[in-house]
Image: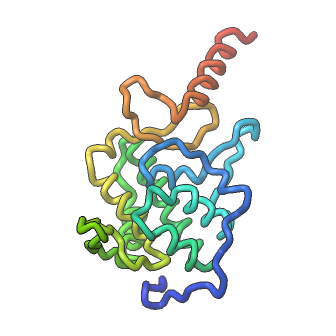
Amino acid sequence: MTAGVGEHKGADMAIVPAPGGSGAPALGEPLPVEFGNTRYAVRGTRGGVHDALDTPETLTAWIAEHEAEFPEGVASAALGGLRPGDLPRFVALRDAIRTVSRNAADGTEPDPAAIATINQAAGAAPRIPRLRLEPDGTLTAIKCADAHPLAALSTLAADAIMLFGSAERDLLRACGGPGCVLFYVQNHPRRGWCSAGCGNRARVARHHERHKG
């Protein structure tokens, strides 16, 4: 049985983010798409796929890299309280997001098991909003007060639910670049790749194909 929020025990020591970073691309896509793209291909590896969630240290590095995209306090709670045993829950959510993204890109029916994984992850930790009265008398809305370490997991899942349950799901695409495994939201009708680099490589590949032999 998957541990619930009440059963989570913080690590004795915080997981130090990998000094070299997560290695995952940052394309400015919605946060759940960026998270799904922690499985990625590196140019020059002959189609080899890398996993930015292969260790707890690279997971926390990725969270640190995207801290500003999480509600206030969520990333810092994760960086200070996640334990190594939490990694499989993040990997399972990432893989479920990729599955549903692939379903959307292919125009196929969403996978029920992947949907169940996302829904379960959304309940991993409470996300309680609060109003904060500032010294100058203004009010600030805090989306996730007193964040639990697993609030990062529930935030990613909740954002994925909002993405997949909206019209934006119909704009999800799989990159057409050679060997690329990334997804993106097609915010322009002529966009066919996750990045300009993949677009250039696709054009070069087509040029070579036309002129070979």
Task: Please determine whether, in this image, residue 174 is positioned above or below residue 89.
Answer: above
Task: Choose top left, top right, bottom left or bottom right for residue 154.
Answer: bottom left
Provide residue 192's location: percent of width, then percent of height: 47, 28
Query: Between 103 and 143, which is closer to the camera in this rendering?
Result: 143
Provide residue 168's location: percent of width, then percent of height: 31, 44
Q: Residue at x 48, y 85 (%)?
A: 3
Query: Between 129 and 95, which is closer to the camera in this rendering?
Result: 129
Task: Please determine whether, in this image, residue 164 is positioned above or below residue 156.
Answer: above
> Number of numbered discs present?
0
Q: Quadrant of the C terminus?
A: top right
Q: Is residue 119 left or right of residue 41?
A: left
Q: Residue at x 43, y 73 (%)?
A: 151
Q: Is residue 13 left or right of residue 32?
A: right
Query: Between 48 and 196, which is closer to the camera in this rendering?
Result: 196
Task: Please determine whether, in this image, residue 172 is positioned above or below residue 136.
Answer: above
Task: Choose top left, top right, bottom left or bottom right for residue 18.
Answer: bottom right
Q: Residue at x 56, y 79 (%)?
A: 81
Q: Residue at x 31, y 71 (%)?
A: 135
Provide residue 46's location: percent of width, then percent of height: 74, 38
Q: Is residue 117 left or right of residue 131?
A: right
Provide residue 189's location: percent of width, then percent of height: 36, 26
Task: Please determine whether, in this image, residue 92 is positioned above or below residue 109.
Answer: below
